[in-house]
Amino acid sequence: MLDTGLTQPVSRAHFAGLGLAVPDRVLTNEELSAMVDTTDEWITTRTGIHTRHVLRAGEKLSDLATEAGKQALSNAKIGADNLDMVLCATTSGDYLWPAMACVVQGNLGAKRACAFDVSAACSGFCYAVATASAFIESGAARNILVIGADCLSRHVNWSDRSTCILFGDGAGAAVLTAGSPDSGVLTSTLGTDGSMVEHVWMPTGGSANPVTEEMLVNGEFGLQMRGRDVYRFCVEVVPKSIVESLCRVGLKPADVDLLVLHQANLRIIGAVADRLGIDESRCFTNVGRYGNTSAASVPMALAEAAHEGKIAPGGVVVTAGFGAGLTWAVNVIKWTGN
Ligand code: ACO
């Protein structure tokens, strides 16, 4: 496990602007009930998800990521030419390579910025925030655009009812900028347990198992998940990691003004918040409308929370992601942004 923020830097990364974009196509539980053997009642009870947004054929994830990035830049009042770096957290970018961050950098005209992707599944945005913070704290960068974007609708097996009901597409973005060392991203924790790679993964399509016609015919492709194992793992490891992260900067769960967890499903969010003793009013959720948007879920939730006035300057915001790898990540932020 990697802990950051152990020494006092000259400056820290501050959230200066946020943005989000989703496709306009909304897929309801009723529509899914006509596609696979499921019901609105099963989905709602187990996950809290009512609708999700999905890309139409021909639409590209990079366009959503670019739109979210533009909003974040405008919100931060920073021009794309002031960016030193563009980071995209994604596992479903437009192409196998190059990185989607390169496509977005080109779309934005952020000519001075270097660009690369961070691949840590649903933990990706929190991993990318920790990466950006380290560059800012070292003095190597001042302004970094961090985007979380995924379109797992392109990667689920639409005949597998246990997974296809869970995911939606979207993008969220944040501009991180160098500021006072007394606030901003105070610390991050990044964790991985690679012995659980097979708990949630895309075993086909990579170099180990390229997709064959036979796989397509037999439906042996797409995301696979051992839902219960993932659930148990997350509920165990995430609260522990949040408490450790807070403790490192002299805080405790009672000091948290807003908890923004990866929006996997309402039951996990509720179980993690319960273990921390954080009540519903301090826990942001929008999974009901968007489903699990993987790396996009945390920045989309942050953008909506800020828009709704739920994050105030001086407040302590904790974000946490968890997912394939298995990976998990926590950022503790003393908020200064809008
Ligand atoms: N509709 C109706 N029945 C269903 C459906 C469905 N959509 N899906 C599964 N079932 C059935 C199963 O077949 C099973 O039936 P059986 O008892 O006859 O065998 C029964 O419902 C229970 O299935 P479980 O998978 O055990 O259901 P569970 O209560 O565990 O809920 C869920 C499933 C919601 C996926 C849960 O395990 C969960 O939330 N897991 C965490 C997943 C997650 O959040 N992952 C995040 C990371 S993902 C990433 O990083 C890409």
Image: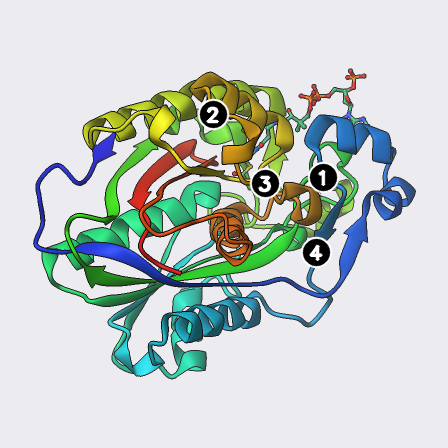
> Mark 1: which amino acid?
Ile
Residue 53 numbered tag: 4
- Whether residues under marks 4 and 2 lie with C-beta atoms below 8 angstroms apart, the answer is no
For marks 3 and 1, give the one nearer the viewer.
3
Q: Is residue 269 above or below residue 58?
A: above
> Mark 3: which amino acid?
Thr
Residue 159 spot, x, y in % from top left: 79, 41
> Mark 4: which amino acid?
His
Choose the circle earlier in sequence order: 3 or 1: 1
Choose the circle earlier in sequence order: 2 or 1: 1
Quadrant housing the C terminus = bottom left
> Mark 2: which amino acid?
Ile
Ligand 1 within 8 Å of the CB at mark 2: no
Rendered residue at 9%/49% (across/down): 9
Residue 221 in view in this figure:
no
The residue wearing badge 2 is 278
- Which of these two is toward me, 306 or 55? 306
- Which of these two is toward me, 278 or 166? 278
Q: CA distance from mark 3 to mark 1?
A: 11 Å
Quadrant housing the N terminus = top left
Residue 49 numbered tag: 1
**Tag 2: Cα neighbours inside 10 Å, few (<14), some, or many (≥20)?**
some
Q: CA distance from mark 4 to mark 1?
A: 11 Å
**Tag 3: Cα neighbours inside 10 Å, few (<14), some, or many (≥20)?**
many
Q: Secondary structure at mark 3?
A: loop
- Which of these two is toward me, 56 or 67? 67
Q: Secondary structure at mark 1?
A: loop
The residue wearing badge 3 is 285
Q: CA distance from mark 4 to mark 3?
A: 16 Å
**Tag 4: Cα neighbours inside 10 Å, few (<14), some, or many (≥20)?**
many
